[in-house]
Image (tube, rainbow, N blue to C red):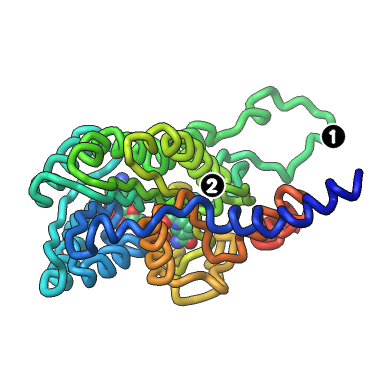
Amino acid sequence: MSTAVILGAAIALPFLIKWYITGSKGPARTTQIPQSQERIVVIGASSGIGSELARIYAHRKAHVVLVARRMELLQQLVQELRPVAGSVHAVQGDVTLPEDVRRITIESLKALEGGIDTLIICAGIISVLPFAELAGIDLSTTDADGESKGYDDLVPTNAQEALDAATKIMNVNYHAPLNLTTHFLPALKRTSVAGNIIVVSSMAGKIGAPTRSIYCASKHAAQGFFESLGMEVEKLGIHVGIVSPGTVATDLRQSAVDLPTSEMSSATASASSEPPKKIAGTKKGAMTARACAEGIIQCSDTRQHEAIMPWFYHASLALQIISPGLVRWLAKKKYGYL
Ligand SMILES: NC(=O)c1ccc[n+]([C@@H]2O[C@H](COP(=O)([O-])OP(=O)(O)OC[C@H]3O[C@@H](n4cnc5c(N)ncnc54)[C@H](OP(=O)(O)O)[C@@H]3O)[C@@H](O)[C@H]2O)c1
């Protein structure tokens, strides 16, 4: 390689790193839409990151609609935020049901008096079991004695359960965001000077991890869809931002599609850094929901295409190109698979 090429690469490297980290940030959107005039719909606002998003927007005096299934939690949040918000409304609905999505869209637009600037899709569910266990496949036995037991032993017992869990997680984490986007897109285009769709994905949408296979699959699907959509709708003045947090201290594990209800309550030990029985992956060093919500709002305000948080996960993504083996090792270590 010639000296000129090496020199050129050395000069370009810092600029490439800066561009990689900041993405293509646009000018601050708050100059186009003042904070107190912003109209926001937060999907998945009843707990965790979504409820913190609602709090921050409300304290900016914005107009906020809160969407989720647990209406009593939404109503408590409305009570808390009404004294400070520009306006705040709750809309109850299940985003996996097409008839609910249509009603959520209409009721949200009505509450916001006809327009929307920002759609934040934060609703999500997780999975926590190794895939073979979910599918009832016992990988510990071998047929060393060579005795034929027929073919039933060679077919898993829970295959349908695995398929059902994968369908459920895809419905919430991929099909619902797609359908919400379909419904809100016309209003974002027609009623906002700078419409934003912000999707809360995950580092699991970037890098696979043991015990999270179907969750990772659903987040990878959403990532691909919104990355592509962002390029298509940019011309229309609509911005798509994808946020990928690492672990956040919330009760997300309570939503695990592959845990029996009896184990879900122990899965919610968000205050503890130790994972409960059966759930791999520590919450040690997790971001707070508040810090995550602040990062999401910054991503929206600055119209970033991509936000990775905390910042050091950029290193994992760079390492995935330079040394994928090391990233696999780190992921296996985090989930106890070494
Ligand atoms: N916690 C983490 O470590 C972490 C890390 C990276 C990314 N994320 C992502 O962050 C997002 C928020 O999760 P969180 O950690 O804040 O967990 P969370 O507290 O469990 O919040 C999930 C939210 O999604 C809503 N939701 C789930 N299914 C729904 C449905 N069918 N219809 C309507 N709303 C539904 C829930 O409301 P209802 O149950 O009331 O409907 C709740 O408000 C998720 O997309 C998650 O994948 C989380």
Ligand 1 contact, mark 2 (Cβ < 8 Å): no
Dividing the image into 4 quarters, which one contains the N terminus?
top right
Which residue is located at x 27 percent, y 36 percent? 185
Q: Secondary structure under badge 1?
A: loop
**Ligand 1 quadrant in view:** bottom left
* Numbered circles on residues, count: 2
Which residue is located at x 28 percent, y 48 percent? 119
At which x and y percent is residue 246? 53, 61
Dividing the image into 4 quarters, which one contains the C terminus?
bottom right
Q: Pick whichever of labels 1 and 2 is earlier in the sequence.
A: 1
Q: Is residue 193 left or right of residue 330?
A: left
Marks 1,2: beta carbons within 8 A: no
Q: Nearer the viewer, residue 97 or 130?
A: 97
Q: Which residue is mark 2?
A: 205
In the depicted structure, whether residue 19 falls above or below residue 54: above
Residue 207 seen in render: yes
At which x and y percent is residue 32? 26, 55
Disc number lying in front (1 or 2): 2
Ligand 1 contact, mark 1 (Cβ < 8 Å): no
Tell me the number on the disc at residue 145: 1
In the depicted structure, whether residue 328 falls above or below residue 336: above
At which x and y percent is residue 108? 15, 47
Tell me the number on the disc at residue 115: none
Question: Please, which residue is most extreme toward the front here?
Answer: 4
Q: Which image quarter: residue 297?
A: bottom left
Q: Is residue 292 left or right of residue 114?
A: right
